[in-house]
Amino acid sequence: MTISAAPFISTAIGPPRRGGLDQLFKMLCFSAATALLAALTGVIVSLAIGGWPAFKAFGWRFFTNTTWNPVTDVFGGLGPIVGTLVTACLSLLFALPTAFGVSIFLVEFAPRAIRQPIATAIQLLAGIPSVVYGMWGLFVFAPFFAAHVQLPLAMAATPGSLLDKLTSGVPNGANIFTASIILAIMILPYMAAIFRELLLSVPTQLRESAYGMGATSLEAVWKVLLPFIRRSAVGAVMLGLGRALGETMAVTFIIGNSHELPKSLFDSGSTIASTIANEFTEATSAMHYSALIALGLVLFMITFVVLGIARVLLGALKTY
Amino acid sequence: MLIGLTRRVTLAIAISGALFGAAQAEEITGAGSTFVNPVLSQWSSDYSKITGDHVNYQSIGSGGGIAQIKAATVVFGATDKPLPPAELAQSGLAQFPVVIGSILPVVNIPGIAAGRLKFTGPILAEIYLGNITKWNDPRIAAVNRGINLPNIPITVVHRSDGSGTTFNWAHYLSQVSPEWKSKVGEGTAVQWPTGLGGKGNEGVAAFVKQTLGSIGYVEYAYVIQNHMAWGSVQNSAGRFIAPSIAAFQAAAATADWTHSTDFDLVMTNAPGVNSYPITATTFVLMYKKPKDAARSAAALKFFKWSLEHGQPQAAKLDYVSLPPALVRQIEAYWAKEIK
């Protein structure tokens, strides 16, 4: 991890003499950056061209309609779009406090002997392929969740109550809630690892000053450490959210894959990525194909907006 | 067995002699249906041991297979949904079936073992339309006398991914239910009126196993391997047929292939008293006048070998080989159409 916190020490030394090798190095870096930009533009343009027939045929209804009918070639993406946003937000809700807890424990409280093992375990979690999370979710987690959480909750709810509305659904653990939990487990290691690096980057003097002034652990973490890293932490959160928005295989296994709008937390739904993964290989009609590519563009736009919001948030936060 | 073996060895020698005499081993490229991939891989591995010809098959899905053969980037494409003759003619393509699979309704109801429950086509359609919602519905009870069906809700499970399995299942429901035909129709993916979707056969099998009161549809091999509780289905002659290789072959034999053009026939709800009604067929697409005639001929030789001698591999993987009469018809079609 090379993400540093706020630029604490800035080296104000100008570049040295420009040799031939230096020029070449600059050129290489420049071409790497432009290649990236070109690839990005290429993706946007080809998605827009591929999705154009769908946008043209359905217009705004593509964003507001829940009908997704490959037989009659009528496509509206509201179900997958809402499913994507709901699962990503829910997963962030679960993962963010946990990631903070894990990283603060590791840096501030954990005995030296167990720090490294836990840190390594987090990195290992990040390395598990998403399809493995999906299979584990389908065969292990979903049945467990259904038997020990979903059924008891559904049985305890009085008919017609808010709890009943929130927990209605097929009691087999394949729903947007379990999909969000699996997503949370998947994005947790990324965020925890970056938070840990950020906390480690807090200068020792700062931490010691806080304790020296008589701050408790809670006060030191809450008033000194977190404000110090929050700028970069927003970036880490956005990285996690980006992964949650685009995650495909694990979600496809466990979300239940219905194109309707989810009616409760325990209802099945779909995300943009899972819909594309499910239907792209066997999409035989041109409009079906185009509608899937159009959904891809929508996902791109959502990610774009998320990054934009992150930038605005970063700008609003004052530098420490 | 011994005769079969001798015949195979003789053929192997004949083929290898013919090929090695003429040229070096050919690389036969193909793409398409994922459904046919296991048996095609087995055939190609056995075939390359005998002849040296290697089949390079990419199982990218039927849609991809059709696109690739139309772009002429492969020697053959494979699709679970036959193309209509007009579309074939437009691209100069020939089409023939290679192997058959079958689809079974499976249930998870306490106290109901495999083979106990009986379904009619209209009942399956009503369940998948969401019109029958409880297992003790009088319409189900009427064909299942003597079975005590519980008062629990039905959870419908379907495939979430586009697939030939879904196409044939929906095609069958369209045959037996006018309401299904007008409201939902048939396709590799459809707008399901109810239920939840599992990814692949394994996803549907997992959801059915984990959900009390559920019904799903999976390929025969998955039912056998996972010991799932299948139900028998009433065929067009009015008999309730348990799934078996013989019943699938009976369907292939009684389906009206002789009157089809370019084998454009989906053989669900096939006539015949012993026919199992819900089957899935994979079709191969090849150019009638290929640019690379040598490779195309090598591909035809491979399919000829597979259709005539590939039955043991197919049976081992729970596919159904085409009946001999149909194989003869296909070979006559090759001779006439593919140059």
Image: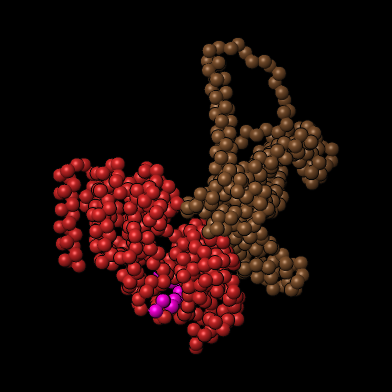
In the rendered view, tell whether residue A313 sits above or below residue B53: above
Residue at the far right in the pictured view: A213
Is residue B324 found left or right of B62 in the rendered image? left
The residue positioned 58% from the left and 27% from the top of the image is A33
Write down the colour of chain B: red
The residue positioned 50% from the left and 52% from the top of the image is A285
Please identify the quadrant where the C terminus of chain A is shown: top right
In the rendered view, tell whether residue B300 sits above or below residue A262: above
Nearest the viewer among A319 and A1 is: A319
The residue positioned 15% from the left and 62% from the top of the image is B6
Write down the colour of chain A: brown
Is residue B240 found left or right of B312 in the rendered image? right
Question: Quadrant of the rendered structure where residue B219 is?
Answer: bottom left
In the rendered view, tell whether residue B127 sits above or below residue A91: below
Number of disc labels: 0
Is residue B116 found left or right of A191 in the rendered image? left
Residue A4 position within the rendered picture, expressed as x and y whole percent measured from the top left: 67, 33
Tell whether position B234 is magenta.
yes
Residue B12 position within the rendered picture, expressed as x and y whole percent measured from the top left: 18, 54
| Viewer can see residue A229 | no
| Range covered by the magenta-colored residues | B223-237
The residue positioned 54% from the left and 67% from the top of the image is B182
| Viewer can see residue A170 | yes
In the rendered view, tell whether residue A11 sits above or below residue B296: above
Tell whether position B238 is magenta.
no
